[in-house]
């Protein structure tokens, strides 16, 4: 005797329209609408470098850290904490921590904020390995706040040793 | 050219230590000017001041002082980034306004300096997020008590002496 499955009947099974709508509404209530307006902000922390401009103009040795934040939508401003890490006697230390800084946005569409004046005095007689690090918040034009963080990826040697404070 | 005059041209090349010293120097030197400005602002809720290459417009709203600034002859003002709650007694209001004026002038000085030999980057308006009149500045947001101690450890007295004498 052969066994047959009621394939036709299974395929023909229909969910009542109201019931299907209720399931969809329940799922939306639980997971929310697909979030396409979530903006992505990125941070670019450049490698710390000795400033030739300040050396020429002020005859001062300074180590500079340039940072840019960029979003897919307009931002009002970015608040950042930044620090320069160094390798001293085979140990990674925080050589200098900058005070929290705020920059308003610039450029087309006001999507970028640039930090180009973070600097610390140093002594050009000695070379040291440095890494830049930053973290903070981007305040978007729509009122939302995006957290950002990043670093300059790898340590690089500069002929400028940060003076101990 | 005095050291103070040189500072007026440095803009973005002012170090954090120089800004701190300038704040203290301005508070000291312009005490009476700030007092008279404070009285005007309290009376009229509005005050316009030019400093370095910038124009500062102060306002008072709901017992809070704020400012907006722009480069002289430019159309666009900075957004309102600083606000300070004023107290009720007149003396406290004047003291707080003096601190606020000095902070605003240092902000404007570093963004809109007088033209000089230094090429200024075309960046947005930039300030230190925590003002010098808040002790949290000296501890970088780690509390006023720690800030109070650190303030005396780091007095920038060398730069301040340079501002007073050179």
Image (cartoon, coloured by chain):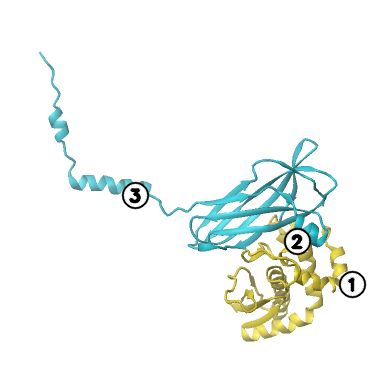
Chain colours: A cyan, B yellow
From the image, tell me which residue sits under label 2.
B16
Q: Is residue A108 left or right of residue A121?
A: left
Q: Residue furthest top?
A: A1
| Residue A47: percent from left, percent from top | 68, 47
- Closest to the observer: A57 or B62? A57
Figure check: A65 above or below A76: above
Q: Nearer the viewer, residue A101 or B97?
A: A101
- Residue B149 seen: no
> Of helix, strand and loop, which one carries label 3?
helix
Give the residue drawn at x 16%, y 36%: A13
Count of marks overlaid on the render: 3
Q: Which mark is residue B62?
A: none
Q: Report crowding for label 1: few under 14, some 14 to 19, many 20 or more residues within 10 A (C-alpha).
A: few
Q: What kind of element bears circle 2?
A: helix
Q: Are marks 1 and 3 in contact (CB under 8 Å)?
A: no
Q: Identify which residue is drawn at 56% across, 57% down.
A: A138
Q: Which residue matches tag 1? A: B165
Estimate how packed mark 2 is, as few (under 14), some (14 to 19) or many (20 or more) residues with alpha carbons within 10 Å: some
Which label's residue is closer to the chain start, 1 or 2?
2
Rounded to the nearest angstrom, the CA distance separating label 1 from label 3 is: 69 Å
- At which x and y percent is residue B15? 76, 61
Is A92 situated left or right of A19 in this image? right
Q: Are marks 1 and 2 on the same chain?
A: yes
Residue B137: image location, x then y, percent: 72, 60
- Nearer to us of marks 3 and 2 is 2
Residue beneath disc 3 = A29
Q: Is residue A126 visible?
A: yes
Marks 3 and 2, how far apart in space?
51 Å
Label 3 CA crowd tier, 10 Å (few <14, some 14–19, many 20+): few
């Amino acid at each position: 005797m052969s066994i047959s499955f009621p394939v036709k009947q299974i395929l023909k099974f229909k969910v009542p329209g109201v019931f299907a709508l209720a399931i969809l509404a329940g799922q939306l209530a639980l997971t929310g609408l697909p979030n396409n307006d979530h903006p992505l902000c990125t941070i670019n922390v450049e490698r710390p470098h000795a400033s030739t401009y300040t050396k020429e103009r002020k005859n001062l040795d300074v180590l500079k850290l340039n940072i840019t934040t960029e979003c897919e939508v307009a931002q009002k401003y970015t608040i950042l904490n930044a620090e320069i890490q160094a390798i001293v006697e085979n140990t990674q230390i925080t050589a200098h921590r900058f005070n929290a800084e705020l920059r308003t946005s610039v450029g087309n569409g006001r999507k970028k904020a640039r930090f180009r004046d973070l600097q610390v005095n140093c002594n050009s007689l000695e070379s040291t390995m440095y890494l830049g690090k930053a973290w903070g918040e981007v305040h978007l034009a729509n009122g939302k706040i995006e957290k950002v963080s990043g670093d300059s990826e790898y340590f690089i040697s500069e002929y400028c040793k940060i003076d101990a404070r | 050219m005095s050291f103070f005059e040189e500072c007026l041209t440095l803009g973005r090349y002012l170090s954090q230590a120089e800004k701190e010293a300038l704040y203290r120097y301005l508070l000291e030197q312009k005490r009476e000017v700030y007092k008279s400005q404070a009285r005007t602002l309290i009376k009229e809720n509005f005050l316009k001041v030019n400093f370095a290459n910038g124009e500062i417009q102060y306002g008072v709203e709901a017992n809070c002082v704020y400012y907006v600034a722009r480069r002289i002859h430019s159309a666009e003002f900075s957004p309102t980034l600083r606000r300070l709650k004023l107290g009720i007694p007149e003396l406290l209001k004047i003291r707080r306004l003096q601190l606020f004026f000095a902070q605003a002038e240092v902000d404007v000085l570093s963004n809109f300096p007088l033209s000089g030999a230094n090429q200024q980057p075309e960046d947005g308006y930039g300030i230190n997020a925590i003002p010098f009149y808040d002790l949290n500045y000296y501890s970088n947001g780690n509390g006023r008590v720690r800030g109070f101690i650190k303030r005396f450890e780091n007095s920038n007295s060398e730069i301040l002496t340079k501002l007073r004498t050179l």
